[in-house]
Amino acid sequence: MSNSYGTLFKITTFGESHGLSVGVVVDGCPAGLEITAGEIQRELDRRRPGQSNITTQRKEEDEIIILSGIYENKTTGTPIAMMVNNKNQAGKDYSHLEHAFRPSHADYTYTTKYGLRDHRGGGRSSARETLARVAAGAIANKYLKAQNIQIASYVSAVGPIELKENYAALDLSLIDSNKIRCPEPATAETMIKLVEETRKNRDTVGGVITCVIKGLPVGLGEPAFDKLHAELGKAMLSINAVKGFEYGSGFAGTKMFGSEHNDEFYTDENGKIRTRTNYSGGIQGGISNGEDVYFKVAFKPVATILQPQTSINDTGESITLEGKGRHDPCVLPRAVPIVDAMAALVIIDFLLRQKAVR
Amino acid sequence: MSNSYGTLFKITTFGESHGLSVGVVVDGCPAGLEITAGEIQRELDRRRPGQSNITTQRKEEDEIIILSGIYENKTTGTPIAMMVNNKNQAGKDYSHLEHAFRPSHADYTYTTKYGLRDHRGGGRSSARETLARVAAGAIANKYLKAQNIQIASYVSAVGPIELKENYAALDLSLIDSNKIRCPEPATAETMIKLVEETRKNRDTVGGVITCVIKGLPVGLGEPAFDKLHAELGKAMLSINAVKGFEYGSGFAGTKMFGSEHNDEFYTDENGKIRTRTNYSGGIQGGISNGEDVYFKVAFKPVATILQPQTSINDTGESITLEGKGRHDPCVLPRAVPIVDAMAALVIIDFLLRQKAVR
Amino acid sequence: MSNSYGTLFKITTFGESHGLSVGVVVDGCPAGLEITAGEIQRELDRRRPGQSNITTQRKEEDEIIILSGIYENKTTGTPIAMMVNNKNQAGKDYSHLEHAFRPSHADYTYTTKYGLRDHRGGGRSSARETLARVAAGAIANKYLKAQNIQIASYVSAVGPIELKENYAALDLSLIDSNKIRCPEPATAETMIKLVEETRKNRDTVGGVITCVIKGLPVGLGEPAFDKLHAELGKAMLSINAVKGFEYGSGFAGTKMFGSEHNDEFYTDENGKIRTRTNYSGGIQGGISNGEDVYFKVAFKPVATILQPQTSINDTGESITLEGKGRHDPCVLPRAVPIVDAMAALVIIDFLLRQKAVR
Amino acid sequence: MSNSYGTLFKITTFGESHGLSVGVVVDGCPAGLEITAGEIQRELDRRRPGQSNITTQRKEEDEIIILSGIYENKTTGTPIAMMVNNKNQAGKDYSHLEHAFRPSHADYTYTTKYGLRDHRGGGRSSARETLARVAAGAIANKYLKAQNIQIASYVSAVGPIELKENYAALDLSLIDSNKIRCPEPATAETMIKLVEETRKNRDTVGGVITCVIKGLPVGLGEPAFDKLHAELGKAMLSINAVKGFEYGSGFAGTKMFGSEHNDEFYTDENGKIRTRTNYSGGIQGGISNGEDVYFKVAFKPVATILQPQTSINDTGESITLEGKGRHDPCVLPRAVPIVDAMAALVIIDFLLRQKAVR
């Protein structure tokens, strides 16, 4: 139980990798928002397998079907159910994995937790679940854009290759200009090369996604437990393969002295209250302060590798496994729209919560 | 709104730094748990100001008062309300801060969010709120210990001084043996020196707390959104001054290849399923796998420094501020019991959720 | 927002009367429960239109499609999504209702609340939403039956015709033996006659459903706000057309003295604690006491009548409306499985909540 | 677990009858609301024991203490904790009840549910818990009055004596003009006589409270499960001793035909949309339609009677019990402010929820 996220703008996802479909119910979306299936599809396409040679080559259409809650391209205030039918899996044989516990996958924990599992393609633990989030996030994002809130995520590290530039020095309109989704072309190229090499080595590699949120009003986030960054952290950590989250100065900030780290307030030429630095990451006391919110999300290397690995089966016997077929050597480029979506879901929820009391 | 945490074991905290009292209501604690005020007080004492020369010298007794829910030293299943009366603040003059926005504090964001604020001692944004969490966590921890679940947190970095040893190489019984709460004596001494120096410089310094949870059964944590590490992350990020969270291999894991990072399963001599490495940090697919859970929490340097700083007041005019009185040069040693408490609150909630369905 | 019900066994419904489909996501169902589509279909068939001459003659198949969460006829612990595609509406013309506010319907309130509405067949306010509840309830009921908990609902009044017998004097196996679903054949016949007459008069009539829950363990229900009867009340009042709820002695009990109303405790021949009377309706202090739980649910007459009525349109102008087509003259027989379902959803949720803490 | 009520304006109550104190935390109250302790005390005084010869003669001051969340008589947006210390119980001997299961009380169910209980004065199951609701309701009501929403509750039946007049025919300003809180003086007198007689007979008697809510905007209430009347029903049924709830035409409406029951819409002389009758009770499709909301709440006779009764103890042995001391012969007059409070809590929560999305 916990397939729901959000307090007022609440999503509930469902579906397994190889069941009939994967979908989501969005409850609490304000009525009257104009949105087309095409706008949702666009985000799904950014997450779709097979979009380039550095992602999995599985061909999945992932075509969105809107079941309810949108009438004549407007949200009606009633629950918006959407789903994508699973195709291209029919007849595929997963019987060799029925009793296997793949290393660093959720096979063992699901089986122990539930007493049984749908093993086909990872079942519910498959990252395929995230397409439901992307669909819901597309709706949230449409709402936010109308309020001049912009969310942009990009790949800032692949393995040891780190983008040197801070987000402020980048042209974020270039994110989708290359297949790794890093807005700095030279670094992007190096990253892509590493991924291609990794793929040739039948291996996988991790990385970092940076997300920037601009245009937030002052006052979003709720003390004490639902601080803005605490919810962002939870939302990001709930994405498959995520191992860490930091915002503002993050872990590096722990090495600073208070006299360096404090963000000095001033009033700018338009009478707006600003800070000269932004180690706070746009959040103070858990509440947005009007500066850019930015954070980093750490992704581990994908667990499925095309190499033989020793593991055990569900009776505890030693087995040898070897990933087959088409898998992602690096999940980062396809994870960018997922980070976008989860960020949008967090922000819209806080926006509505704040509207309720002011 | 959000002064509550937990699904089944739910706490709601209340109170401002300089109001009548700070407290907590614990709802959902199983009945029949033996617990004394002394056991709760012991944890509060670990968090108490004035416990050493490297923490604030404010003298606060922080004496726990149990208002309800515990009868003859046993929980009754009804809500447990506890509070600590605020003393030692009477007559203190905070008028110089009434209109000031202190740098990297929550003065500006609270004032904008709510339209007004109780400015005395930071009001609700004060870390004094965390004593309510520590009291609740003491109850949770008592329950967990009876199930052989051990939680241990310690300071693993202060500023640039990092403890080199992995938790497994440390004697965790030494955590409280020194005032910085680092279980490695030599490193502890260096850390303490840095904090003392920082205090002399009228400055503050950040650091990192590592937490280890041993003895978890397999199966805790809920896909998709309430993954075990996602809730741990949220809980930690909700603590004042926290800027980052990582578990298992964390950010360092992003630089690894899948072939290095995967944790190989095997069956040990007792027939127990184990992994040879633990980059997963005891969690796979958001669910505990029986290995140790470990994570790191990044704390920024305390914002209040005893140096003059430029800022603005609530009409936007430039002012100069200077911290006065007794403040923590480094929040880390006092934050250790807070991390312990939040970890306990996360784990007990998942334990109860799992009991519900199995 | 509020298309979800339940704390641990949580359902979220979606869909409009004339959208693509109506469905439900069940989150929190224990894993390993055996359930077939046929078992769910059976309950849907009890709710289906067109099942007799005293219900609407619309022909709807209402065939359940299981999208996720059930694998090889066992629940997997992951969310169970189910839906029914809407058929038989294609091409139907609802344009005469697009701007009309039908008397005692939700047209006016939806339009004002949301600023727009899907007017076709009542949209989201249609009782068609309840099929989602019946599907979810069928799963809950399967779980409860395995624990020897039996839920039985029946029609105890239609208009002024009231069943005289108390539930204990009835043979509840006869509920489905007639089309009005009243287990006393003679009364059933009178009721049916009244409904048939009402239909001829192009009118509608209300009534009462009684529900009995046998086999509950002692201890279900949560003080203070989630008392067992409070949740039952909310669940019943959330069904379309319900106007009242009473349990145990109900409104009649208000006329009694305490000396009459108190239920005397005794220990029966098997050493079981019992009460000699059951004015408490099986619930004391909001918690089940092991006696039968019973309650009554009041249904108003259906608002759609096949007679001309004066109303207004969305610009406030006076109009004349007349219901057309095939409608229920009395909703009671089709509401019986809905009451069953909601009762099951309430009980399973409390069962799981109780398991969590004991 | 369930000592909380509300989605956005959320209260959590705590405390046992004879513990240190009974209190409440209100989370989510909008900031800037002016409220004094005196305004809260006024409502507590309406609920206070000993206010007249027809209520219990226990002398309890029930003095409100505001612990947090209100600064200089304004809410700050942070949690408002309030409590009343329990007095007058010291030294009282409850040992004769330690092992007894009083008829129609919660002694047996609590003991079985939790495995133990605080037996003194009913512990947590005591209606003393409701003072926490009244304190919270006073704050909610202050907010509602500022929006021209008026809530008025009154005693409409005591035992068989029923107030004949509909609420619209009554002068609701007279509610507090007599000690039974019935606004029709002649009926009030008859009711009072019955209560006095009942008290002389060492017995107790039930009754009905009617509540009217005027001034609601159109659009409050949430389909599908959190319908306005469903939440009102739950809130009322969660009050001690309540056995039933009906709104609008209620149970009587089940005997009507649709052609009689439908509320005809029209546009009044001010261009406002109204209905000619109000069988709907101001709610259509679960959403307020701008007409008066009205409902009835059934209270059973108090279980504690000053007569010998046969019961059992916790080992199942037969015992004889006899209520002692000062008890309410009729809970109705003191329940009026509780109904007011719960109604206010329901309405403010829906108001805030509606603000969030419009």
Image: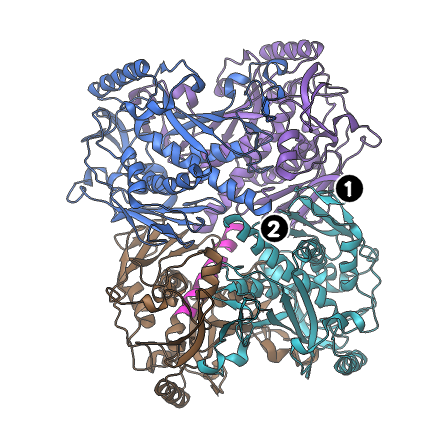
Chain colours: A purple, B blue, C cyan, D brown
Residue C65 location, x and y as percent?
Answer: 78, 48
Q: Would you say the magenta stretch is mainly helix, strand or loop?
A: helix
Examine the image and state in which quarter residue A259 appears: top left
Which contiguous range is marked in magenta? D338-358
The residue sitting at the left extreme is B91
Cα distance, mark 1 to mark 2? 21 Å
Res C72 label = 1
Mark 1 vs mark 2: in front = 1
- Mark 1 and mark 2 lie on one chain; the one further toward the N terminus is 2
Residue A328 location, x and y as percent?
Answer: 69, 20
Residue D339 forms part of the magenta stretch: yes
Determine which residue is flagged by label 2: C9
Closer to the camera, D234 or A33?
Answer: D234
Residue B104 location, x and y as percent?
Answer: 33, 30
Examine the image and state in which quarter residue B2 appears: top left
Residue type, label 1? Glu
Residue B8 location, x and y as percent?
Answer: 49, 47
Examine the image and state in which quarter residue A218 appears: top left
The subunit letter for the residue under badge 2 reads C
The number of numbered discs placed on residues in the rendered structure image is 2
Left or right, A91 with respect to D95, comes to: right
The subunit letter for the residue under badge 1 reads C
Q: In terms of secondary structure, where does tag 1 sit?
A: loop
Q: In terms of secondary structure, where does tag 2 sit?
A: loop
Disc 2: CA contacts within 10 A as few (<14), some (14-19) or many (>=20) = many
Residue type, label 2? Phe
